Image (tube, rainbow, N blue to C red):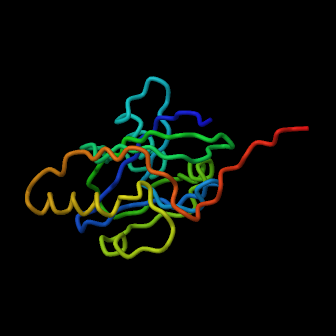
Amino acid sequence: MRTPRQAARTVVVDPDGAVFLLRSENVEVGPHWCPPGGGLDPGESPEEGARRELREETGWEDLEPEALLCTWEHDFTRHGVPVRQHEHVYLARGPRRGPLGDVSQAHAVDRILAWRWWSPEDLADRDAEPLWPPTLPALVEAVRTAWAAGRPGPSPAHLGYLPNPPGAPAPARPSSGG
């Protein structure tokens, strides 16, 4: 049985269409790349949570989540607890830069190992480590296409539940004791 968890993330896109992603490690999923984000605090809306998480993990005080890009659900293990996480993923435009200030504590708690900007070409031709959400390259391409045509962006995609990719580590099973 998995514990339900609500979360929010922000996909930050620079003027050239590159996307800022964090590389995280998880016992169930293994290494993966994802936009800044995490679990919602009690009473917090997804947009508020996306804003807070973006600031905690990047130090960027000047960016705001804009349009909802997508929603999706996935499984992973958080601090030893198997969860099914429902995420709201927002979009923001921002300059290409690294994290500001000391974000090392937030990175240590969330097992964030690295960060980098991914060009559209990098997203299309990336290494074998999974992306969260897995459809991120197609979602970003739809955004870039809409922006190039002078439109605000595509309607939010509702991806539903997406299982972990083949080859991901199996979830830890509690011992039966005895």
* x and y, in percent, of residue 46 in the image: 38, 34
113 sits to left or right of 8: right
From this view, report whether residue 58 is shown above or below residue 38: below
> Considering the image in quadrants, where does the N terminus appear?
top right
> Considering the image in quadrants, where does the C terminus appear?
top right
From this view, report whether residue 137 is shown above or below residue 90: below
- Could you say which quadrant of the image residue 118 lies in? bottom left
* x and y, in percent, of residue 169 in the image: 64, 59
89 sits to left or right of 84: left
Outermost right residue: 178
Q: Nearer the viewer, residue 36 or 29?
A: 29
- Residue drawn at x 81%, y 42% as measured from the top left: 175
Disc count in the image? Answer: 0
Q: Nearer the viewer, residue 73 or 51?
A: 73
- Residue drawn at x 29%, y 60% as measured from the top left: 95
Outermost top residue: 43
* x and y, in percent, of residue 49 in the image: 42, 36
8 sits to left or right of 108: left
* x and y, in percent, of residue 171 in the image: 66, 51
- Residue drawn at x 39%, y 45% as measured from the top left: 72
160 sits to left or right of 81: left
- Residue drawn at x 41%, y 46% as measured from the top left: 54
